Image (spheres, rainbow, N blue to C red):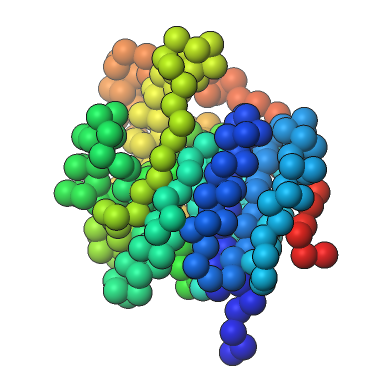
Amino acid sequence: MPEDPHPWCVAIFTSREAPDVLLNSVRAALSAAAHPTCIDVLVNGNRVLADHLCPLLVGLTPLGTSSLRLWFLPLGDKAATFNRYVHEIWPGSALAFFVDGYVRVRPDAFSRISEALHSHPAALAASGVPNTDFINRALRQQMLREGGMHGNLYALSRDTLERMRAIGYRLPLGIYRTDPTLAAALSFNLDPSQFDWQLKERIATVEGASWDIDRQPWWFPSELRGRWLRRARQAQGVLENRAVRHHFAQQRRSPAALPETAAELVSSWAADDPKSFEAAMRRRGLRAAWQSLKRGRDWSARHHSAELLFSSHK
């Protein structure tokens, strides 16, 4: 097989980041690229941001054999963006990194993750670990002790991506817990009917691979709004986690059989195990979260193709 033109790929997910924050994320990814790398900036649901970025990315055009591309995806949903990247945009590479648009990966983060996957041949993925600041201390210790996947920075191997494509694995649209849902599928080796849960063995946690975030003061309107939205969706995340556990651990269903939307996923759990579902509804906030989730949204934009707005390599 000929050598990949891009041994590494990086997918940067963004929808609401300020342009300067996103540019810092792209610059950091370019600096951390130790091999020819294809960096895809994936803007979902925010055409204004995508159009504003186009001229700004021209000045970041990488040298040599690395490349930079900007995509606009009409549906504002991270799960839909992940699905589109895996099944249509990913150009093929030995390793694909997934990064949130508001983080700056540290210069050695990609290399450390790559080395960890080479030294853990049974692993399907590898995850960075939060740094040592006060906010992340408890989560960092939990990941190092128990394993896990952090959505700010993780990587999937070529074999994992090809298997996901082959079985038709997709995240449910609208799901809040995107990364735990993916981690659950990987922990069952993408086949719960044949394999048991092995989180630490199948997702390597890499202590030295980390990132930085420029946090706004808590009283900034955007920070307060973000905290309110996260709190409102935490209850939805609890429902999703229970439904995912039911799908994989109890029913032993395939990752490819996940329902199309988060609402359908929770509905499936409710239909299969009404007693457990009703018990959950007695917890504070979960019934309201379920009512909100059931109201749904218009998913018709999922049929629209991703639009390539900029490429450094024509």
Which residue is farthest left? 145
Specify whether 260 is left or right of 58: left
Specify whether 234 is left or right of 294: left
The x and y percentages for residue 296 are 61, 25
Depth check, front residue: 215 or 254: 215
Q: Number of numbered discs present?
A: 0
Locate residue 193: give its quadrant.
Answer: bottom left
Depth check, front residue: 184 or 42: 42
The x and y percentages for residue 143 are 24, 46
Depth check, front residue: 303 or 281: 303
Locate residue 92: give its quadrant.
Answer: bottom right
The image quadrant where one finds the N terminus is bottom right
Residue at image position (24%, 58%) is 200
Specify whether 108 is left or right of 158: left
The image quadrant where one finds the C terminus is bottom right
Depth check, front residue: 306 or 96: 96
Residue at image position (57%, 56%) is 30
Which residue is farthest bottom? 1
The x and y percentages for residue 108 are 40, 59
Residue at image position (80%, 37%) is 51
Tell me if I can see residue 32 in this picture: yes
Picture layout, residue 36 above or below residue 306: below
Residue at image position (29%, 74%) is 119
The x and y percentages for residue 195 are 30, 65
Picture layout, residue 282 above or below residue 49: above
Tell me if I can see residue 243 in this picture: no
